């Protein structure tokens, strides 16, 4: 059986698809990590139940909350970037999968063609064999 002429391209497309899937996995992981960090910071911010005892405690608590709010803002911005990266990774994975699928379909057509040609040649051999056998029997019958 003949090998698929675009086998190298198919391997390349599968490698590209695998790479895109790995990038997508990393983007999902990064997005999940940032969401967990933001949730943890939010929990810390809401869980603080200290009642200020004096002026210095009140100022420290206000500074802490302002810092935590700033951190939440930064995490939100990072999460927005991670969302954009995730969208891009999903698009790249879809494109790589589509490219691999198109070459796979060509391979399937090639295999069908090769199989059909092999069957056609086999049928020609069988027909020739049957014709010869009929001719031999016909000649013997005439004698």
Image (cartoon, rainbow, N blue to C red):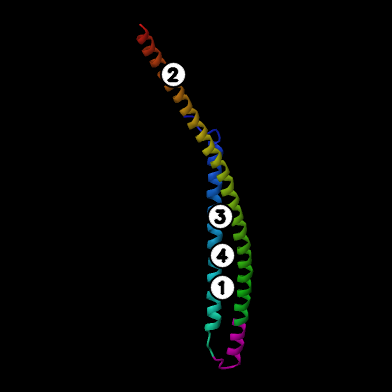
State how many labels appear: 4
Q: Above or below — where is 100 with respect to 57? A: above
Quarter containing the C terminus: top left
Distance from disc 2 to disc 1, alpha carbons, whole Å, reads 78 Å
Residue highlighted by disc 3:
23
Secondary structure category for the residue under label 2: helix
Q: Residue at x 52, y 75 (%)?
A: 40
Q: Nearer the viewer, residue 71 or 59?
A: 71
Q: Residue at x 55, y 93 (%)?
A: 53
Residue highlighted by disc 2:
128
Q: Which residues are magenta?
A: 51-64
Q: Nearer the viewer, residue 85 or 70?
A: 85
Q: Above or below — where is 115 with respect to 87? A: above
Secondary structure category for the residue under label 4: helix
Instruction: State if disc 1 and disc 2 touch (CB < 8 Å).
Output: no
Q: Above or below — where is 26 with respect to 136? A: below
- Using a 10 Å C-alpha cutoff, classify the residue at mark 1 as few (fewer than 14 neighbours), some (14 to 19) or many (20 or more): some
Query: Looking at the image, is mark 2 or mark 3 nearer the viewer?
Result: 2
Query: Looking at the image, is mark 2 or mark 1 nearer the viewer?
Result: 2
- The mark found on residue 31 in the picture is 4
- The mark found on residue 93 in the picture is none
Residue highlighted by disc 1:
38
């Amino acid at each position: 059986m003949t090998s698929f002429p675009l086998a190298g391209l198919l391997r390349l497309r599968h490698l590209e698809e695998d790479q895109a899937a790995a990038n997508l996995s990393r983007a999902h992981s990064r997005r999940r990590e940032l969401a967990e960090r933001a949730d943890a910071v939010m929990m810390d911010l809401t869980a603080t139940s200290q009642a200020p005892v004096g002026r210095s405690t009140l100022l420290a608590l206000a500074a802490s909350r302002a810092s935590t709010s700033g951190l939440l803002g930064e995490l939100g911005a990072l999460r927005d970037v991670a969302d954009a990266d995730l969208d891009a990774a999903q698009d790249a994975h879809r494109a790589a999968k589509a490219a691999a699928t198109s070459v796979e379909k060509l391979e399937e057509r090639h295999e069908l063609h090769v199989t059909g040609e092999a069957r056609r040649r086999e049928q020609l051999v069988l027909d020739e064999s049957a014709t010869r056998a009929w001719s031999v029997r016909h000649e013997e019958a005439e004698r």
